[in-house]
Amino acid sequence: MSIDEAFKFRKGAGSTLLLACGALGKEIVWLIEANGLTHLDVQCLPANLHHMPSKIPEEIRSQIRANKDRYEKIFVVYGDCGTGGVLDRVLEEEGGIERIPGPHCFSFFWGNDAFARYGEDEISTFYLTDFFCRAFETFVWQALALDRHDSMVEFVFGNYEKLVYMPQTENPELEEKAQEIAQRLGLTYEKRFVGYGDLETALRHA
């Protein structure tokens, strides 16, 4: 089963539907179960929409329209994710649907307040969450054809200076992999444990 398929749907008691990025599926399901949030259903969109952010707003619109008559509430678990405000316009047009605050998952995992204070100082930083670490080979390396054109690594990552691994869990195997990725990309390595950050807070109030 692919990473995109693994957490495509989770059925709960069904009063609220979470429309979520597939890159967050495992973490969302864990938080639902850990916090007893039985009213939540989850529908994940493919994680590879990260490579096509212009498609995210209309994909979300389609899912809202397909599900709005079945749920009391729909909550979107996407940051702006490179849509340039278009996602927020779609959510307003579809009845003022709420989404998790923040520009992207790195921000709300770290904590949006912290990212707003310090993120601008890390413009040359490449971030990895647990998902992006697990999926690096297929989601980054192969998706950017670096497995076939390794000479492009400098072109793609040449402006980065540091890799920051922002794990949700303490996992020695993932940490070792994150260190290997940093070495492969020629970046200095830093681990910054963030846990679930604002994602947990948002789901508790969804």
Image: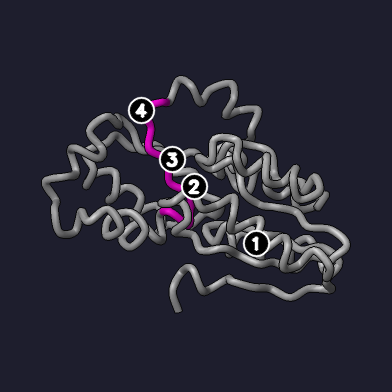
User: Which SS class for mark 4?
Assistant: loop
In three-dimensional space, the C-alpha distance between marks 2 and 1, rounded to whole angstroms, equals 14 Å
In the displayed structure image, the side of residue 47 where residue 60 appears, left or right: right
Magenta extent:
123-132
Residue 124: which disc? 4
User: Which SS class for mark 3?
Assistant: strand
Q: Amino acid at mark 2?
A: Ser
Q: Amino acid at mark 1?
A: Ser
| Image quadrant assignment for residue 134 | bottom left
Across and down, in percent, residue 37 comes to 81, 63
Residue depth check, mark 1 versus mark 4: number of the one nearer the observer = 1
Closer to us: 90 or 32: 90
Q: How many marks?
A: 4
Residue at 61% in and 59% down = 27
User: Which SS class for mark 1?
Assistant: helix
Residue at 63% in and 58% down = 20
Q: Amino acid at mark 4?
A: Ser
